[in-house]
Amino acid sequence: MSYNWNWPIFFSPVPSGETTYLFWLIEGLKFTVLLSLSAWVLALIVGSLAGVLRTVPNRFLSGAATAYVELFRNIPLLVQLFIWYFVMPELLPKSMGDAFKQSDPLFQQFVAAFVCLGLFTSARVAEQVRSGINSLPRGQKSAGLALGFTLPQTYRFVLLPMAFRIVIPPLTSEFLNIFKNSSVATTIGLIELSRQAQQLVDYTAQPYEAFIVVTALYLMINIIVMSLMRVVEGRVRVPGYMGGK
Amino acid sequence: MQLIEIQNISKWYGEFQVLTECSTSVAKGEVVVVCGPSGSGKSTLIKCVNALEPFQTGNITVNGISLSDKKTNLPKLRSRVGMVFQNFELFPHMTIIENMTIAQEKVLGRSKEDALTKGHALLKRVGLVEQTNKFPGQLSGGQQQRVAIARALAMDPMCMLFDEPTSALDPEMVNEVLDVMVALAEEGMTMMCVTHEMGFARKVANRVVFMDRGRIVEDAHKDEFFGSPRSERAQEFLSKILSH
């Protein structure tokens, strides 16, 4: 196999001459990080709420939360993305849908990918949160109620602080997944990292360099996320409990 | 005056009846010990008293407030009924003093200073001031249970419920917990205790309630219960647990 390695390619100007290929990658990295972080915030909020509701005694609320979780985790991510991007604007009230369709394409792509990734991941977060709550001794809830806490207070002060600590490792996995899953946004044209890698290949015919660097960038993001979560885990560790001293 | 009045309580888990027409009462200042073989429903009964377990028929009143009345503010009622659990159930992510103060602040609306003062005083009383800033997981079982009793007392309860408070303890730690309970009884606290500690019952109980298969089989003054139990089941139970 003869392959012409050309590492300096990243510093060559792009065809339009305005910038370099490296800048394309940085631009892609920026969108991958922005999209993933914002979707993670959405996933944590919605997922925690759905996870808590799955454990409450009210059958209507827990049933609704279960339906939500099953819906969002049983439809392929790609299908969900197409629904949010192509179908939802048609289902909105006409004026809103038209305004959305006439907005900046980048805005449309970003919003659709943000909602899609956020809600898809929220279903998974919900399951983690639920399992965390259910893993606590039953007596903890009783003890909270027996002290006179209302049910919401019992969750707030007693159950959730421990449940979240317990599920930090699986939540870290979801946090890593959201960065990896964000690459599906390439299919609707969002210029995130993997999209830029493809573009680089199209323009330069240097696939090895392009994908080696992009792979390294994804790895770097996830190593940062893992280290960050390890710090969080250490900070909230409870002395005398599980891994605590 | 009867502080806790249990009237004809029945409870089912699906088809299975766990409590059958249980009636008893605890007067102000009285100490009632509930005992019986495992699975007899004693823990379930005591959890009905502060509505941690729902029941289908009958009624319970605490200080004249009916639990079956839909308008009863259960959290408010529970805040005045202290409960101690078999597995302590301290909140593991809070320090000992935080365990003591959180409900005082969030439920009773006390100021932080008042809650701390009360918390420290009670920790001193159960002999655990030096553990103030430790976490529950760093304490022994006996120490945790003493904190749990102090935590319940911090709410100034009108009565205390104990659900097998010494069953999960190493034998050498049982007495430190019982000592706290005896002192409490001698101060006149109204107490309902599910326990197998017959020494404790003999020492401080006024009455003993004996349960078997979801029914209250015997409800007698302690001397009568230990001296000449009427039911055969209670005689058998006593002979088994007192033979060593």
Image: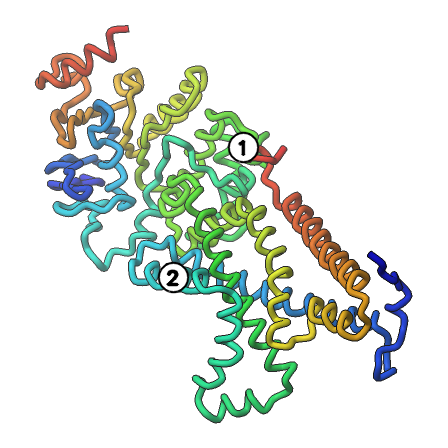
Colour scheme of the rendered structure? rainbow
Q: Position of residue B210 (x, y in %)?
A: 17, 25
Q: Which residue is mark 2?
A: A65
Q: Relative to B205, does residue A78 appear above or below in the rendering?
A: below
Query: On the rendered structure, is A176 left or right of A203?
Result: left
Residue drawn at (36%, 43%) of the image: A142
Local crowd size for mark 2, using a 10 Å CA cut-off: few (<14), some (14–19), many (≥20): many
Placement of the N terminus of chain A among the 4 image quadrants:
bottom right
* Image quarter in which the C terminus of chain A is found: top right
**Quarter of the image where one finds residue A138:** top left
| Left or right position of A105 against A152 | right
Q: What number of labels is visible? A: 2
> How far is mark 2 from mark 1, CA to CA?
34 Å
Chain of the residue under label 1: B
Q: Are marks 2 and 1 on the same chain?
A: no
Kindly give the residue lying farthest to the top in the view shown: B244
Q: Nearer the viewer, residue A7 or A165?
A: A7
Left or right of A237? Residue B189 is left
Q: What is the number of the mark on residue B137?
A: 1
Q: What amino acid type is highlighted by mark number 2?
A: Ala
x, y percent for residue A189: 64, 77
Q: On screen, B197 above or below A57?
A: above
Q: Quadrant of residue A16?
A: bottom right
**Which mark, by number, is residue A113?**
none
- Residue drawn at x 30%, y 19% is B197
